[in-house]
């Protein structure tokens, strides 16, 4: 029997201690440190990615080395997020809230490959064969080449993957897989990290793409902890409200394509359906002639997307007015409010402020600043902006409107949906003059407010 030693590991952030402590010094959480028994270094034998074969350095300019092949999932929105399809030998991690649709989309992807003659192995560690089959029957994803395996022990899974010739392997979920050679219960940091590392070696050595479904913690990150995100090739997150039909699949890491690419889906009784024109979906219910509503031409990865930014400013009866923000960074909204107070002379200190991005979209780019500011001013002044107006640009602390990227794509997307006027940074105006939409370049946030509020 191999020698072991005890160590104490924080189950939230992975910090290691020589003795038990009540509070983790890294993440600051109480009662998250637990004892784990580990094998002494050198006793745990791991195989290399090359399978033990000797490898020599290769010049990076060598054109004889072929690019890894890609396989289409059969779902255009998934192919977009993955950068064109599934790369052979890749390891992909799929995360999201419970019930958001992770197992659903993976069954649909599995059926897409199986319907084209690829043998797919779906490892269900949390549901029985009958449960998974019932879901596949409801989704219409039954296929003879889609094989289900209800097993969680790593050695048995390695045997199945090595002996079988599969075009895709799905592990649902990585937290349910365990190795009998390692201490700890399934889902512990040691088990999850080492099992994921073994799947990585299997994928690289055999050339079989493997998808791992991961649980999400209360903080919204994949449990494990975040060491899994550094280990895998691609990280996909499912976003959306559980009571809404809209679902967004976002790539936050992709070694084979663009990051922050998104795919838009709608949850139906028969599974996830693609939304090929999300801009029309987001603007379908936008009210006209109402203050506090501004359309933003945003960019998600390489895709232009029109979204509605809403703001509501009202008198507050509280000693500390409320600041409620959904879909954008609250710190960014606080910065915009400070700039409007200092540079535009608008007083928000005694007002409740609510900011929302309609449709459940999350915006991370600074180009949303100008649309947020105009929505706030529109609600503050009870003056709606023109119904065919869009705006984008980054706002600095001096009140200046800074340039952003992909201007032509933003303006062209807005013009395609009938918007006739666009307020944008003056440094970007020359990139959008010949598109056909009226361009209003601005250099200061006050100038943008004057143009937007003109009647």
Image (cartoon, rainbow, N blue to C red):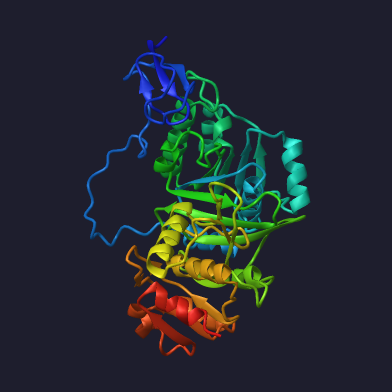
Q: Residue at x 58, y 43 (%)?
A: 170
Left or right relative to 29: residue 311: right
- Which residue is pictured at 38% across the width and 67% down the height? 395
Q: Position of residue 431 (x, y in %)?
A: 37, 83
Quarter of the image holding residue 397? bottom left
158 and 323: which one is in front? 323
Question: In the rendered view of the protein, which quadrant contains the C terminus?
Answer: bottom right
Tell whether 124 sits left or right of 79: right
From the top left corner, tell me how far across and down residue 317 is, in percent: 61, 51
Q: Which residue is at the front of the view, 450 or 266?
A: 450
* Residue at image point 44% right, 77% down: 448
Q: Is residue 78 left or right of residue 207?
A: right
Give above or below for 330 relative to 121.
below
Using the image, determine if residue 448 lies above or below residue 436: above
Left or right relative to 354: residue 150? right
User: Looking at the image, can residue 375 be seen?
Assistant: yes
């Amino acid at each position: 029997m191999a020698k072991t030693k005890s160590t104490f590991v924080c189950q939230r952030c992975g910090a290691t201690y020589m003795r038990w402590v009540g509070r983790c010094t890294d993440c600051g959480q109480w009662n998250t440190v637990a004892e784990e028994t580990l094998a002494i270094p050198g006793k745990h034998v791991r195989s290399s990615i090359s399978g033990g074969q000797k490898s020599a350095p290769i010049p990076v300019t060598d054109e004889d080395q072929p690019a890894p092949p890609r396989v289409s999932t059969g779902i255009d929105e998934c192919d977009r997020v993955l950068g064109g399809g599934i790369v052979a030998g890749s390891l992909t991690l799929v995360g999201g809230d419970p019930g958001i649709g992770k197992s659903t989309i993976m069954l649909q992807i599995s059926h897409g490959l199986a319907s084209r003659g690829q043998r797919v192995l779906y490892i269900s560690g949390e549901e029985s064969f009958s449960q998974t089959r019932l879901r596949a029957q409801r989704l219409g994803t039954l296929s003879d080449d889609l094989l289900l395996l209800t097993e969680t022990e790593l050695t048995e899974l390695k045997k199945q993957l090595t002996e079988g010739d599969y075009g895709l392997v799905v592990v649902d979920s990585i937290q349910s897989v365990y190795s009998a050679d390692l201490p700890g219960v399934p889902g512990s940091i040691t088990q999850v990290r080492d099992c994921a590392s073994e799947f990585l070696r299997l994928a690289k050595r055999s050339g079989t793409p493997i998808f791992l479904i991961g649980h999400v913690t209360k903080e919204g990150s994949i449990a494990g902890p975040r060491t899994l995100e550094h280990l895998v090739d691609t990280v996909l997150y499912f976003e959306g409200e559980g009571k809404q039909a809209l679902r967004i699949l976002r790539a936050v890491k992709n070694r084979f394509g663009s990051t922050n690419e998104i795919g838009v889906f709608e949850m139906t009784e028969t599974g996830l359906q693609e939304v090929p024109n999300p801009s029309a979906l987001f603007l379908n219910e936008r009210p006209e002639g109402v203050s506090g509503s501004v359309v933003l031409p945003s960019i998600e990865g390489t895709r232009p997307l029109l979204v509605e930014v809403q703001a509501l400013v009202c008198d507050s009866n509280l000693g500390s007015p409320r600041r409620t923000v959904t879909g954008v960074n609250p710190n960014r909204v606080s910065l915009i409010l400070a700039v409007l107070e200092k540079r535009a002379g608008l007083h928000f200190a005694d007002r409740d402020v609510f900011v929302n991005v309609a449709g459940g979209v999350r915006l991370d780019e600074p180009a949303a600043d100008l649309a947020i500011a105009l929505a706030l001013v529109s609600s503050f002044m009870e003056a709606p902006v023109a119904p065919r107006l869009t705006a984008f640009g980054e706002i600095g602390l001096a009140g200046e409107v800074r340039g952003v990227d992909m201007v032509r794509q933003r303006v062209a997307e807005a013009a395609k949906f009938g918007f006739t006027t666009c307020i944008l940074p003056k440094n970007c105006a020359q990139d959008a003059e010949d598109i056909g939409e009226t361009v209003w370049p601005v250099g200061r946030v006050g100038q943008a407010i004057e143009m937007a509020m003109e009647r």
